[in-house]
Image: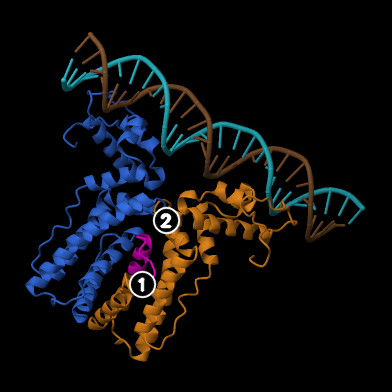
Chain colours: A blue, B orange, C brown, D cyan
DNA sequence: CAATAATGAAACGAAACGTATCGTTTCTAA
DNA sequence: TTAGAAACGATACGTTTCGTTTCATTATTG
């Protein structure tokens, strides 16, 4: 998966029909489907996202999509996972720097790539489907653990007292980020018009965590 | 609206057919529609919520619903507005008390009434419809202003320094609350199994806000 | 070569969307 | 009293999407 030409039909053109490659999945089909899904999300958002639309765009059969993904939520999750969210990899030397950098990068990732449209759609779908919610909760737990490690590293470095309220800090960071995404509030800071409030949020959180140690 | 018997069909029974009451809207129809919408959200969540289902349940015509609400998002907004979110009215004597009480009440409101299902649906719909997002942003601005007043009252009382970072505090409070709702994390605290982490979140936020004054 | 799994095209019945049409009811103004 | 207007729910409509089934074809494996 990901190593093959996707054979996604550019809009308006017919791609060669893919056929079976024998008793195994065709990675070209998978790529085509995931890329089509991503393109549609980018172009029309969740409102235009349907299995029908993805199948059409990918030149794939609906049975193929349903064979691998039970519903559109699951497909969304795979689209997001594929977008390689490496933005969380930070190491600026200070905890405050790490958190500011992490969030700055996350917002840019959400803003400048189809990832933002994808992830907000995942959250939306999770409100109407219990299985999707469970998947999202699991995903969140994983991400929280990672950020918890970033914070623990800061503690080890002495940037934060050992008894700082780490669970609250991590929860509030994610609440902040998600809310920015869901309210469409991830525009790039612009020193002339939109001052960057993100560092102030991080500062408040870190000082609060330290003060509750 | 709200003063009349709704004439909502109990499931399985036929309500008397409503007719026109002359060249104005029939408040009984409006009530029936809003109540049906609320009931469906409670029972099936957003997945079962459709204009068709509401019309059937309310014994109303789809043209009637579309006459008054452009789409299901708008209907959701009215359902939520109708649920009288008075939980924000707090006055415990201290700012920390106020914020803890406010959030405790808000979570109970979301948990114990159809309001939670409604509001999470509103947020979900806002991810696929720009007009719904605009309405949600407006609603949020209003609620932030109110909480800002609660905080300002605390500042006047001396619970928080005058130069506390009020914008960050308010934004983080809402991020926290929304995220709890969206991840299904609003279960009632249970001292034996689920300790109440909410006061710790509030404490961190208040100390952080104070420390950034 | 036969069996198997996979592939996309096509078809299907059901459901929902948003709109149009209809007969009926009620209200208001003349 | 009458005519006109707005509203009401029932019905119908064309379109889209859902999830599933069927089909002919392809490639792989034993």
In the picture, which quadrant includes the C terminus of chain A? bottom left
- Percent across and percent down for residue B197 are 30, 73
* Residue B174 in view here: yes
| Magenta segment includes B184 | yes
Dot 2 alpha-carbon crowd within 10 angstroms: few under 14, some 14 to 19, many 20 or more: many
Left or right for B87, reference A138: right
Q: Residue B190 carries which label?
A: 1
Magenta stretch holds residue B32: no
* Secondary structure of the residue carrying numbered label 1: loop
The reply to the same-chain question for discs 2 and 1 is yes
Q: In what element is the residue under mark 2?
A: helix
Dot label at residue B126: 2
Q: Mark 1 lies on which chain?
A: B
Residue most toward the bottom?
A: B158
Image location (x, y in percent) of residue B182:
37, 60
A101 or B172, which is in the foreground?
B172
Q: In the rendering, at what x and y percent does residue C21 appear?
A: 69, 37
Region in magenta: B174-189
Q: Quadrant of residue A76?
A: top left
Foreground pick, B186 / B149: B186
């Amino acid at each position: 998966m990901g190593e093959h030409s996707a054979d996604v039909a550019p809009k308006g053109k017919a791609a060669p029909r893919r056929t079976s490659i024998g008793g195994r999945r065709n990675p070209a089909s998978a790529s085509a489907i995931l890329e089509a899904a991503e393109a549609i999300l980018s172009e029309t958002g969740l409102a235009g996202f349907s299995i029908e639309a993805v199948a059409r765009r990918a030149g794939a059969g609906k049975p193929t999509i349903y064979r691998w993904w039970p519903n559109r939520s699951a497909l969304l999750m795979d689209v997001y996972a594929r977008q390689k969210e490496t933005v969380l990899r930070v190491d600026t030397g200070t905890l405050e720097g790490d958190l500011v950098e992490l969030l700055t990068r996350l917002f840019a990732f959400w803003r400048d790539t189809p990832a933002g449209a994808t992830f907000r759609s995942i959250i939306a779908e999770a409100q109407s489907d219990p299985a999707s919610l469970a998947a999202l909760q699991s995903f969140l737990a994983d991400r929280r653990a990672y950020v918890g490690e970033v914070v623990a590293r800061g503690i080890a470095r002495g940037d934060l007292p050992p008894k700082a309220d780490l669970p609250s800090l991590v929860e509030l960071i994610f609440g902040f980020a998600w809310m920015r995404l869901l309210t469409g509030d991830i525009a790039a800071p612009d020193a002339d018009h939109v001052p960057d409030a993100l560092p102030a949020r991080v500062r408040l959180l870190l000082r609060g965590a330290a003060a509750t140690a």
